[in-house]
Image: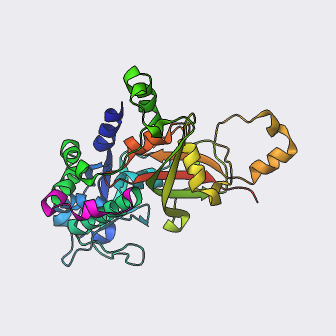
Amino acid sequence: MANEAVKYVWEGAIPLQIHLHKSDVASHPAPPPALVLAPRIGYLPLLIPHIKPYFKDSLPPGEDSIWFDYKGVPLKWYIPTGVLFDLLCAEPERPWNLTIHFRGYPSNILIPCEGEDFVKWNFVNSLKEAQYIINGNCKNVMNMSQSDQEDLWTSVMNGDLDAYTKLSPKLKMATIEDDFSRKASLSSPQSRQGATEMDVAGQVKTARVPVRLYVRSINQDFENLEDVPEIDTWDDISYLNRPFEFLREEGKCFTLRNAIESLLPEFIGDKAQTSGEERSKDDDTEEADGLLREMGEIKLARIQGIEMKLEIPFSWVVNNLMNPEFYLHISVLVKAPQR
């Protein structure tokens, strides 16, 4: 099951319909939109070599400064394409209609990107950050040969999971045993005989997980995702780069809900009520209702295009839904508490 999940992540793609912005059209008639299948784990600038030749006969002369927008919002190139889609389209739009610009780079909103080397640098830098969070240092990334680094990056660009799987063990990233695998292994006599001191009942295990959260907090309630207000600016989104200390206690399952509540106390409060969940009997009291109004409500958590059930073990999410740079990207929609 785990291998199938990782394969799903690597094979995930989003159909794009890319329109040339009207200010860049120097031909008549305007060219039809380009249709591209974009890997979820990839980055928008990596699509430019495929898109630019399509529009080249319609462009005015001059230097190109290429960027994309969605409904007027410039798209941050260093965020994986799948994360952008999950974040900006509460109700998934297929194909995803984007606009490409060849002029007027919004340098007040987007950091410069001058091609693939910038994207590669961003990837390797994130890999170093992730390893520092997980292992306490980034020496394994720093000590990788130039050819191995290049091959690792090429595997990500090409969506080659087999090549990536051969190279990534050289990074020696610490892993978290997920609860599904643990239950299966502990059920066998051989595993019970070979238990280490770390498996003593009641003992707490810790691990640090690199997490990037993209949080939208909205005031109004809604029943359907199509009723979620559109994002007008990046100011509508809180970007949080938060290392998470994962605690696992024997006999307890630490869930995705537990993780999000721990990571977002300023949005949710001490204990969130998740959409669709039944209340306890005590919730009928006026005091309980008042408390609920003071807490945020998680309306949606999306990872790798999946609307997650919040009771899933967090260890499984970490081991199967991380991006290749070892960050877990979580898009969260929160209904703001009533003050």
Asked if the magenta segment contains residue 161, the reply would be no
> Compared to 302, does 130 lie above or below?
below
Can you tell which quarter of the image residue 57 is in?
bottom left
Q: Horizontal placement of 272 versus 256: left or right? A: right
Residue 91 shows up from this direction: no
How far from the left and from the top, in percent, is residue 10? Answer: 29, 43
Residue found farthest to the left: 147
**Which sits in the foreground, 180 or 260?**
180
How far from the left and from the top, in percent, is residue 294? Answer: 75, 54
Image quarter of the C terminus: bottom right
How far from the left and from the top, in percent, is residue 189? Answer: 40, 20
Asked if the magenta segment contains residue 147, the reply would be yes
How far from the left and from the top, in percent, is residue 244? Answer: 50, 55
Residue 173 shows up from this direction: yes
Q: Horizontal placement of 28 versus 257: left or right? A: left
Q: Which residues are magenta?
A: 135-149
- At 21% from the left and 65% from the top, the residue drawn is 116
Q: Horizontal placement of 264 versus 145: left or right? A: right
- At 39% from the left and 56% from the top, the residue drawn is 134
State the scheme by which the image is colored. Answer: rainbow
